[in-house]
């Protein structure tokens, strides 16, 4: 695992492929404990710098923020300055899982589904939105998904391999499950 960001004095590498592909349970638990401990200690000021870097640093910072909620995530998702980093922002919002968090992917989708020329992380925002809808018992995604909805128009016009809006929900679910494991493991001996 190669480090990609030094945040708060510690070097981190966190991505969905990292956390779901650690081979040994002991290795996964050690990584989870270290990540959760850092997420609890890191400050918003520590996260400010990597959120200004390239996508790998932003993805790692989003993971740390997703473990211990940070308000800045929604702003960064909406700004979408770098593609791929949005995956981490969407995970963080899904992990938090409140009605307020559900509005942020909506704002992102309202802005970016109207722009097929900008293929950022719309598919991750839709997956986060669907996860939040399921968790909160809401049906807010329906207007986006109808036959003439913004999602259908965007996938028809954009060069995206992701046309099934639910196809990424399992990945976000695995990320959230791992985050729960991280936060529980930091309290275990």
Image: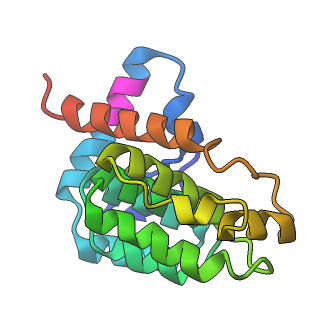
Q: Is residue 39 visible?
A: yes
- In this rendering, the answer to whether 85 lies above or below 175 is below
Identified at 13% across, 32% down, the residue is 187
Identity of the residue furthest to the front in this view = 147
Magenta span: helix, strand or loop, mainly?
helix
Q: Nearer the viewer, residue 90 or 13?
A: 90
Identified at 52% across, 75% down, the residue is 108
- In this rendering, the answer to whether 5 lies above or below 29 is below
Residue range in magenta is: 28-32
Q: Give left or right: position of 34 versus 169.
A: left
Q: Please tell me in which quadrant of the rendered image residue 51 appears.
A: bottom left
Image quadrant in which the C terminus is located: top left
Query: Is residue 30 found inside the magenta-colored segment of the image?
Result: yes
Q: Nearer the viewer, residue 83 or 116?
A: 116
Residue 69 place in picture, x, y as percent: 25, 60
Residue 47 place in picture, x, y as percent: 34, 71
């Amino acid at each position: 695992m190669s480090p990609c960001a030094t945040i708060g004095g510690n070097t981190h590498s966190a991505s969905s492929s990292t956390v779901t592909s650690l081979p040994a349970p002991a290795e996964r638990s050690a990584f989870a404990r270290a990540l959760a401990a850092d997420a609890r200690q890191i400050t918003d000021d520590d996260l400010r710098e990597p959120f200004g870097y390239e996508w790998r640093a932003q993805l790692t910072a989003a993971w740390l923020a997703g473990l211990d909620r940070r308000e800045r995530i929604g702003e960064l998702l909406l700004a979408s300055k770098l593609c791929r980093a949005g995956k981490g922002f969407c995970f963080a919002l899904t992990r938090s899982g409140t009605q307020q968090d559900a509005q942020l992917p909506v704002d992102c989708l309202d802005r970016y589904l109207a722009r097929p020329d900008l293929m950022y992380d719309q598919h991750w925002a839709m997956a986060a939105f669907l996860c939040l809808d399921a968790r909160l018992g809401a049906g807010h995604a329906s207007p986006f998904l109808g036959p003439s909805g913004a999602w259908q128009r965007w996938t028809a016009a954009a060069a995206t391999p992701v046309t099934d809006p639910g196809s990424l929900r399992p990945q976000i679910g695995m990320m959230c499950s791992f985050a729960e494991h991280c936060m529980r493991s930091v309290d275990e001996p």
